Image (spheres, rainbow, N blue to C red):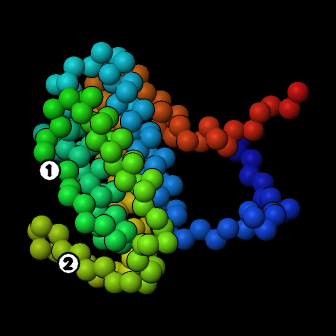
Amino acid sequence: MIELRLARDVTPRQRFTMTYAHSARIVFDDMLGALDRIVAKAEDAGMPDTVLAEQLTEDMFPLELQLRVALNQVLLALNQVGGKALPLEEEEYRSLAEVRERIAAVRSLIDQADPSEWAAPDAVVDLTLPNGVRFLMSSEENIRDWIMPNFYFHVTMAYALLRNAGVPLGKMDFLPHMARHIVPDAE
């Protein structure tokens, strides 16, 4: 059974209003940490770099592209609303070690991204996909409705592909950041 409780005695310091930018940065950092963890477990399990070609079905992206697209979602967010002009990950990853290096590099960019420099929540994002579909939405909607669902999708696919390839993964490998919220048993 899951028990939820509300904190009634919240201090003024804890009444921080989280903007979409603050929230996005936390999610990106947490999930990039999870992504690094699952790739590290693949390395530790002795997975060959050929695992990057794994697919669940013939018509889906291989693991390598799932990983690259996940990282590109973060870079797109930084470019579209974070005031950056960063190149996207276009080169194919050749090894699990290279994937971990790229994850670390993108995490570093997130660490450096100042939420106060992100576009106002209602600033307009005009996004045209390679297939010609065009979206007009606010910065906050862009992060909430486009970037985050795509980011989670590709991180989840990477998890599924590695698990399917035999990497011993469990839910806490996907959600390791939840460890910071664990309440120790009362003695």
Crowdedness of circle 2 by 10 Å Cα count: few (<14), some, many (20+)?
Answer: few
Left or right side of 6 for 38:
left
Residue wearing tag 2: 134
Residue wearing tag 1: 90
The alpha-carbon separation of the residues under discs 2 and 1 comes to 22 Å
| Helix, strand or loop at mark 2 | strand
Quadrant placement of the N terminus: top right
Please say whether residue 122 is visible from this viewpoint: yes
Residue 142 location (% of width, % of height)? 36, 72
Q: Earlier in the sequence, mark 2 or mark 1?
A: 1
The amino acid type of the residue labelled 2 equals Arg
Q: Nearer the viewer, residue 45 or 3?
A: 45
Looking at the image, is 11 positioned above or below residue 119?
A: above
Circle 2/circle 1 CB separation < 8 Å: no
Residue sitting at the far front = 112
Residue name at image x 14 percent, y 50 percent: 90
Q: Nearer the viewer, residue 162 or 20?
A: 20
Left or right side of 145 for 173:
right
| Residue 65 falls in image quadrant | top left
Quadrant placement of the C terminus: top right
